[in-house]
Image (tube, rainbow, N blue to C red):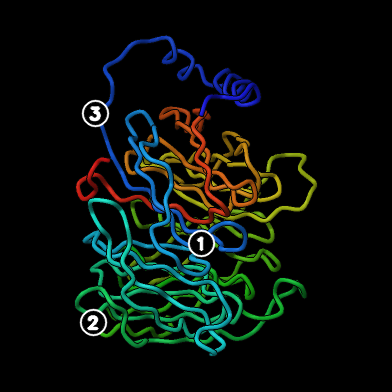
Amino acid sequence: MKLTSKMAALALMILSLSPVASAQAGSSSKPAPSRHYLVYVGTYTVRESKGIYVYHLDSSRLTPTSTPVLAAETANPSFLAIDPTEQYLYAVNETEDYQGQKTGGVSAFRIDRKTGGLTFLNEVPSGGTDPCFVSLDHEGKHVLVANYTSGSVSVFPILPGGRLGKATAFVQHHGHSVNPERQEGPHAHDIALSPDGRFALVADLGLDQLVVYRYDATSGKLTPNHPPFARVTSGSGPRHFVFDPSGRYVYLLSEVGSTVTVFAYDAALGTLHEIQSLSALPDGFTGHNDAAEIAIGRSGKFLYTSNRGDDSIMVFAIDPTRHTLKVVAHVPTLGKTPRNFAIDPSGEYLLAANQDSDNIVAFKIDQKTGIPVPTGQVVEVSSPVCITFMPASTAAQP
């Protein structure tokens, strides 16, 4: 898709802020080697979407080489994760009913490496309502799930052949925080392991806590750490977090307060110490906003967050010594409600999933300034809420 006049104007505006980008725009260089990926898109099946979609992408030119097609029909696959061997894909089914039980589901699929199609293997109850996040342990032996509405977390073993077994761990959170509409009870929103795989961290929006569990990779068990959590400012509503490349710092994005909190992380003890908190909104914004996604660029120099309401990506520079953040830029996503975004494996491009405008908008990241610049590439997918890449080494070109 070609740039609209609005996109072109925005691109010129952002490029004008970046002397490096402007200089590169007029220079000649050797083309980047061809890099092909399968791009999987998790969706909400509330309008036209029927499940998980896939398309081929040539990231050397950021050119979709196929249109998105339905890879697997499944209900509300709102978050996806691919196992380390790239043979299996796992999706949470963000619902409140699984075969008559008051719980959501977790589905397992086998990946067709030639077409990107998904073969359904099995589905298990998630243990709580509206599961919204799924991740895998580092060895690909277990799947970890956060159940949002009921405020619980579960762990499931991956059986031979990729199927999911019965839960090895289930923990129900308890309590509430200060916002009566959003924090009347626990709401687990993210679960992922520390870089060494010894601890599982959980962002609980309803408790204003980043909860820490000891994780047994052999048994798939979770036990509370000591101390069991780190608090954030009351009413913040923690949503997603990311470790820095060194594994010594954690950056936590809070949805309700639209803030980023920086923690120093003690890998030996699994403890967190807050060193900074700052707004994830541009100066002067006064409307309603829900912060959504957070990621660190491949260079480790820049951090990105998305805003639903302001409909933007915020860019922060990471101080190489103190690891604190400084705002660099505010970039509109050219769509509505960017629930998720993903940086491609090369680290050169950012794809923003605009849930309520039914599109994925592509940006090229200026490697010196960190600023994403719109490329004009737009892929239409109904209600996109999660983007996951699979490298070319296991994906045949169309």
Query: Which residue occupies 71% across, 71% down?
Result: 182
Query: Which residue occupies 42% across, 75% down?
Result: 106
Residue placed most toward the observer, 295 or 45: 45
Snapshot quadrant of residue 215: bottom left
Q: Are marks 1 and 3 in contact (CB under 8 Å)?
A: no
Residue bearing mark 3? 33
Snapshot quadrant of residue 140: bottom left
Residue bearing mark 1? 50
Q: Is residue 140 left or right of residue 252?
A: left
Residue 318 lies, with reference to residue 76, above or below; the image says: above
Residue bearing mark 2? 218
User: Which of labels 1 and 3 is toward the front?
Assistant: 1
The location of residue 293, given as percent across then percent down, is 54, 53
Q: Is residue 249 left or right of residue 353?
A: left
- Mark 3 is on which residue type? Pro
- Mark 1 is on which residue type? Lys
Residue placed most toward the observer, 195 or 295: 295
The location of residue 60, given as percent across then percent down, is 32, 30
Q: Residues within 10 Å of mark 1 (few under 14, many from 20)?
A: many
Q: Residues within 10 Å of mark 2 (few under 14, many from 20)?
A: few
Query: Which residue occupies 47% across, 28% down?
Result: 369
CA gap, disc 2 and disc 3 = 40 Å
| Marked residue nearer the N-terminal end (1 or 2) | 1
- Mark 2 is on which residue type? Thr
The location of residue 21, given as percent across then percent down, is 46, 20
The location of residue 228, given as percent across then percent down, is 48, 80
| Marked residue nearer the N-terminal end (2 or 3) | 3
| Marked residue nearer the N-terminal end (1 or 3) | 3
What is the secondary structure assignment of the residue under circle 1?
loop
Q: Are marks 1 and 2 in contact (CB under 8 Å)?
A: no
